[in-house]
Protein backbone atom coordinates (compact mmCIF):
# COMPACT_ATOMS: atom_id res chain seq x y z
CA UNK A 1 0.00 0.00 0.00
CA UNK A 2 1.52 3.33 -1.11
CA UNK A 3 2.02 5.99 1.55
CA UNK A 4 -0.03 9.16 1.05
CA UNK A 5 2.47 12.01 1.38
CA UNK A 6 -0.42 14.48 1.58
CA UNK A 7 -1.07 13.22 5.10
CA UNK A 8 2.50 14.05 6.12
CA UNK A 9 2.18 17.50 4.53
CA UNK A 10 -1.02 18.18 6.46
CA UNK A 11 0.50 17.09 9.79
CA UNK A 12 3.71 19.06 9.17
CA UNK A 13 1.90 22.22 8.16
CA UNK A 14 -0.39 21.86 11.16
CA UNK A 15 2.55 21.47 13.53
CA UNK A 16 4.31 24.61 12.28
CA UNK A 17 1.04 26.56 12.36
CA UNK A 18 0.37 25.41 15.92
CA UNK A 19 3.74 26.72 17.05
CA UNK A 20 3.48 30.01 15.14
CA UNK A 21 -0.10 30.69 16.25
CA UNK A 22 0.69 30.06 19.90
CA UNK A 23 3.67 32.41 19.99
CA UNK A 24 2.03 35.21 17.99
CA UNK A 25 -0.16 34.46 14.98
CA UNK A 26 -0.15 33.95 11.25
CA UNK A 27 -0.19 30.14 11.16
CA UNK A 28 -3.18 30.17 8.81
CA UNK A 29 -0.92 31.88 6.26
CA UNK A 30 0.65 28.43 5.96
CA UNK A 31 -2.30 26.08 6.42
CA UNK A 32 -4.68 27.88 4.05
CA UNK A 33 -2.26 27.73 1.10
CA UNK A 34 -1.54 24.06 1.82
CA UNK A 35 -5.24 23.18 1.84
CA UNK A 36 -5.91 25.15 -1.36
CA UNK A 37 -2.90 23.66 -3.15
CA UNK A 38 -4.27 20.23 -2.23
CA UNK A 39 -7.34 21.01 -4.30
CA UNK A 40 -9.87 22.52 -1.90
CA UNK A 41 -11.89 25.58 -2.99
CA UNK A 42 -10.92 28.66 -0.96
CA UNK A 43 -14.19 28.68 0.99
CA UNK A 44 -13.85 24.99 1.90
CA UNK A 45 -10.20 25.49 2.87
CA UNK A 46 -11.32 28.37 5.09
CA UNK A 47 -13.88 26.16 6.83
CA UNK A 48 -11.60 23.11 7.04
CA UNK A 49 -8.87 25.20 8.63
CA UNK A 50 -11.21 25.89 11.58
CA UNK A 51 -10.93 22.27 12.77
CA UNK A 52 -7.17 22.64 13.12
CA UNK A 53 -7.52 26.06 14.76
CA UNK A 54 -10.09 24.74 17.23
CA UNK A 55 -7.99 21.81 18.43
CA UNK A 56 -4.70 23.69 18.46
CA UNK A 57 -6.12 26.51 20.59
CA UNK A 58 -7.69 23.99 22.96
CA UNK A 59 -4.31 22.29 23.28
CA UNK A 60 -2.35 25.52 23.81
CA UNK A 61 -4.94 26.79 26.32
CA UNK A 62 -4.41 23.62 28.31
CA UNK A 63 -0.65 24.12 28.03
CA UNK A 64 -0.80 27.68 29.36
CA UNK A 65 -3.10 26.62 32.19
CA UNK A 66 -0.77 23.76 33.13
CA UNK A 67 1.98 26.37 33.56
CA UNK A 68 -0.19 28.43 35.93
CA UNK A 69 -1.22 31.15 33.45
CA UNK A 70 -4.84 31.90 34.35
CA UNK A 71 -6.69 34.73 32.56
CA UNK A 72 -10.27 34.06 33.70
CA UNK A 73 -12.84 35.61 33.81
CA UNK A 74 -11.33 38.33 31.58
CA UNK A 75 -10.97 35.88 28.67
CA UNK A 76 -14.60 34.84 28.90
CA UNK A 77 -15.87 38.43 28.69
CA UNK A 78 -13.84 38.97 25.52
CA UNK A 79 -14.88 35.64 24.01
CA UNK A 80 -18.60 36.51 24.10
CA UNK A 81 -18.57 39.44 21.61
CA UNK A 82 -15.85 37.73 19.56
CA UNK A 83 -18.06 34.68 19.06
CA UNK A 84 -21.01 36.80 17.95
CA UNK A 85 -18.76 38.56 15.48
CA UNK A 86 -17.26 35.29 14.22
CA UNK A 87 -20.66 33.88 13.25
CA UNK A 88 -21.36 37.05 11.26
CA UNK A 89 -17.94 36.93 9.60
CA UNK A 90 -18.24 33.25 8.68
CA UNK A 91 -21.66 33.86 7.16
CA UNK A 92 -20.23 36.71 5.04
CA UNK A 93 -17.40 34.44 3.83
CA UNK A 94 -19.85 31.70 2.84
CA UNK A 95 -22.17 34.05 0.95
CA UNK A 96 -19.44 35.75 -1.11
CA UNK A 97 -18.89 34.61 -4.71
CA UNK A 98 -15.84 32.33 -5.00
CA UNK A 99 -13.85 34.67 -7.26
CA UNK A 100 -14.43 37.71 -5.04
CA UNK A 101 -13.56 35.77 -1.89
CA UNK A 102 -10.32 34.58 -3.53
CA UNK A 103 -9.25 38.14 -4.29
CA UNK A 104 -10.11 39.37 -0.79
CA UNK A 105 -8.23 36.43 0.69
CA UNK A 106 -5.18 37.26 -1.44
CA UNK A 107 -5.25 40.92 -0.34
CA UNK A 108 -5.68 40.02 3.35
CA UNK A 109 -2.85 37.49 3.28
CA UNK A 110 -0.46 39.99 1.68
CA UNK A 111 -1.43 42.70 4.19
CA UNK A 112 -0.96 40.40 7.17
CA UNK A 113 2.42 39.10 6.04
CA UNK A 114 3.64 42.69 5.48
CA UNK A 115 2.64 43.43 9.07
CA UNK A 116 4.37 40.25 10.22
CA UNK A 117 7.76 40.94 8.65
CA UNK A 118 7.76 44.65 9.51
CA UNK A 119 7.43 44.16 13.26
CA UNK A 120 10.48 44.62 15.45
CA UNK A 121 11.05 42.93 18.75
CA UNK A 122 10.13 45.13 21.67
CA UNK A 123 10.87 44.64 25.31
CA UNK A 124 8.02 43.87 27.67
CA UNK A 125 7.52 46.72 30.12
CA UNK A 126 6.23 46.20 33.62
CA UNK A 127 2.96 48.10 33.61
CA UNK A 128 -0.29 47.85 35.52
CA UNK A 129 -2.91 45.77 33.72
CA UNK A 130 -6.25 47.39 32.86
CA UNK A 131 -8.79 44.56 32.84
CA UNK A 132 -11.97 46.18 34.15
CA UNK A 133 -14.18 49.26 33.77
CA UNK A 134 -14.02 51.23 30.55
CA UNK A 135 -10.95 49.34 29.35
CA UNK A 136 -12.86 46.05 29.48
CA UNK A 137 -15.75 47.56 27.51
CA UNK A 138 -13.41 49.05 24.92
CA UNK A 139 -11.72 45.67 24.50
CA UNK A 140 -15.07 43.91 24.14
CA UNK A 141 -15.97 46.31 21.32
CA UNK A 142 -12.67 45.64 19.57
CA UNK A 143 -13.09 41.89 20.04
CA UNK A 144 -16.50 41.97 18.35
CA UNK A 145 -14.82 43.50 15.30
CA UNK A 146 -11.93 41.05 15.55
CA UNK A 147 -14.48 38.23 15.75
CA UNK A 148 -16.06 39.35 12.46
CA UNK A 149 -12.64 39.36 10.82
CA UNK A 150 -11.69 36.03 12.41
CA UNK A 151 -14.93 34.44 11.30
CA UNK A 152 -14.38 35.71 7.78
CA UNK A 153 -10.75 34.57 7.56
CA UNK A 154 -8.61 33.38 10.45
CA UNK A 155 -5.26 34.54 9.05
CA UNK A 156 -3.71 37.31 11.15
CA UNK A 157 -6.33 37.34 13.92
CA UNK A 158 -3.68 36.69 16.55
CA UNK A 159 -1.81 39.87 15.67
CA UNK A 160 -4.95 41.97 16.07
CA UNK A 161 -5.72 40.39 19.44
CA UNK A 162 -2.18 40.95 20.75
CA UNK A 163 -2.31 44.56 19.56
CA UNK A 164 -5.55 45.30 21.46
CA UNK A 165 -4.42 43.53 24.64
CA UNK A 166 -1.12 45.40 24.58
CA UNK A 167 -2.46 48.88 23.83
CA UNK A 168 -5.77 48.82 25.73
CA UNK A 169 -5.23 46.36 28.56
CA UNK A 170 -1.44 46.51 28.97
CA UNK A 171 -1.11 42.77 29.37
CA UNK A 172 2.21 40.94 29.22
CA UNK A 173 3.02 38.90 26.14
CA UNK A 174 2.60 35.58 27.95
CA UNK A 175 -0.82 36.45 29.37
CA UNK A 176 -1.89 38.06 26.10
CA UNK A 177 -1.11 34.84 24.27
CA UNK A 178 -3.07 32.86 26.86
CA UNK A 179 -6.08 35.15 26.36
CA UNK A 180 -5.65 34.97 22.59
CA UNK A 181 -5.72 31.19 22.28
CA UNK A 182 -8.73 30.85 24.59
CA UNK A 183 -10.77 33.52 22.77
CA UNK A 184 -9.87 32.07 19.38
CA UNK A 185 -10.89 28.62 20.60
CA UNK A 186 -14.30 29.85 21.74
CA UNK A 187 -15.17 31.98 18.72
CA UNK A 188 -14.04 29.27 16.30
CA UNK A 189 -16.70 26.97 17.72
CA UNK A 190 -19.28 29.36 16.30
CA UNK A 191 -17.37 29.79 13.03
CA UNK A 192 -16.88 26.03 12.60
CA UNK A 193 -20.57 25.32 13.13
CA UNK A 194 -21.47 27.99 10.57
CA UNK A 195 -19.16 26.53 7.93
CA UNK A 196 -20.29 22.98 8.78
CA UNK A 197 -23.95 23.85 8.28
CA UNK A 198 -23.05 25.26 4.87
CA UNK A 199 -21.16 22.07 3.94
CA UNK A 200 -17.88 23.97 3.51
CA UNK A 201 -15.62 21.59 5.45
CA UNK A 202 -13.49 18.59 4.42
CA UNK A 203 -13.38 16.79 7.76
CA UNK A 204 -10.69 14.24 6.89
CA UNK A 205 -8.14 16.92 5.97
CA UNK A 206 -9.02 19.05 8.97
CA UNK A 207 -8.70 16.22 11.48
CA UNK A 208 -5.37 15.02 10.07
CA UNK A 209 -3.96 18.55 10.13
CA UNK A 210 -5.18 18.88 13.72
CA UNK A 211 -2.81 16.11 14.82
CA UNK A 212 0.13 18.33 13.96
CA UNK A 213 -1.41 21.62 15.06
CA UNK A 214 -2.45 20.36 18.50
CA UNK A 215 1.02 18.90 19.08
CA UNK A 216 2.79 22.08 18.00
CA UNK A 217 0.48 24.26 20.07
CA UNK A 218 0.99 22.17 23.21
CA UNK A 219 4.77 22.30 22.92
CA UNK A 220 4.87 25.99 22.01
CA UNK A 221 2.66 26.99 24.95
CA UNK A 222 5.18 25.38 27.32
CA UNK A 223 8.40 26.60 25.72
CA UNK A 224 10.00 29.62 27.38
CA UNK A 225 11.39 31.14 24.19
CA UNK A 226 11.01 34.41 22.33
CA UNK A 227 8.38 34.57 19.65
CA UNK A 228 9.33 34.94 16.05
CA UNK A 229 11.69 32.96 13.85
CA UNK A 230 13.38 34.41 10.76
CA UNK A 231 13.27 31.11 8.91
CA UNK A 232 9.56 30.70 9.59
CA UNK A 233 8.91 34.27 8.46
CA UNK A 234 10.78 33.71 5.19
CA UNK A 235 8.87 30.48 4.56
CA UNK A 236 5.55 32.17 5.30
CA UNK A 237 6.35 35.06 2.96
CA UNK A 238 7.15 32.68 0.10
CA UNK A 239 3.98 30.64 0.67
CA UNK A 240 1.77 33.71 0.97
CA UNK A 241 3.15 35.40 -2.16
CA UNK A 242 2.66 32.21 -4.16
CA UNK A 243 -0.84 31.66 -2.83
CA UNK A 244 -1.92 35.28 -3.25
CA UNK A 245 -0.72 35.23 -6.86
CA UNK A 246 -2.68 32.04 -7.53
CA UNK A 247 -5.84 33.41 -5.89
CA UNK A 248 -5.71 36.83 -7.57
CA UNK A 249 -4.81 35.86 -11.13
CA UNK A 250 -6.16 32.33 -11.45
CA UNK A 251 -9.42 32.45 -9.47
CA UNK A 252 -12.54 31.54 -11.40
Image (cartoon, rainbow, N blue to C red):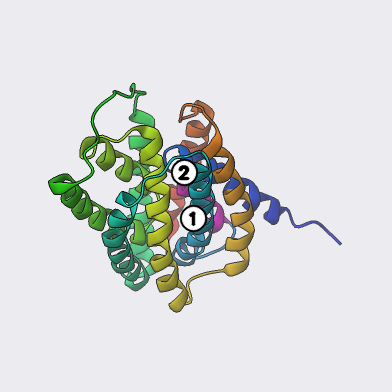
Query: Is residue 42 or residue 151 the one in the foreground?
Result: 151
Q: Is 27 in the magenta?
A: yes
Mark 2 falls on what kind of element? helix
Query: Is residue 34 or residue 184 the one in the foreground?
Result: 184
Mark 1 falls on what kind of element? helix
Whether residue 34 is visible to the viewer of this picture, yes or no, is yes
Name the residue furthest right: 1
Query: Is residue 153 or residue 142 the one in the foreground?
Result: 142
Disc 1 crowd rating (10 Å Cα; few below 14, some 14-19, many 20+) is many
The residue drawn where x is 35% and y is 49% is 157
- The location of residue 128, given as percent across then percent down, is 23, 31
Q: Is residue 241 above or below residue 42?
A: above
For the stretch drawn in magenta, the main secondary structure is: helix
The residue drawn where x is 47% and y is 33% is 233
Q: Is residue 23 above or below residue 204?
A: above
The quadrant of the image that shows the C terminus is: bottom left
Magenta residues (range): 26-37
Residue 112, quarter of the rendered image: top left
- Name the residue carrying label 1: 53
Query: How much space separates mark 1 and mark 2, taking CA atoms?
Result: 9 Å
- Name the residue carrying label 2: 21
Name the residue furthest left: 134
User: Is residue 251 shown left or right of residue 219?
Assistant: left
Whether residue 30 is visible to the viewer of this picture, yes or no, is no
Q: Assess whether mark 2 and mark 1 are in contact (beta carbons under 8 angstroms).
A: yes
- The location of residue 27, given as percent across then percent down, is 48, 45
User: Is residue 75 shown left or right of residue 36?
Assistant: left
Q: Is 38 in the magenta?
A: no
Disc 2 crowd rating (10 Å Cα; few below 14, some 14-19, many 20+) is many
Amino acid sequence: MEFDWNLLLLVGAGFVAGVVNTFAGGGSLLTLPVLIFMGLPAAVANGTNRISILLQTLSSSAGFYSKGVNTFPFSIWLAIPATLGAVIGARIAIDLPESLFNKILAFVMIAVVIYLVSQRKRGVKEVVERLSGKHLWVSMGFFFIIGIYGGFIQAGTGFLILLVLSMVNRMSLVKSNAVKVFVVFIFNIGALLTFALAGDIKWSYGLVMSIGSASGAWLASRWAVDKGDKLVKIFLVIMVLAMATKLWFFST
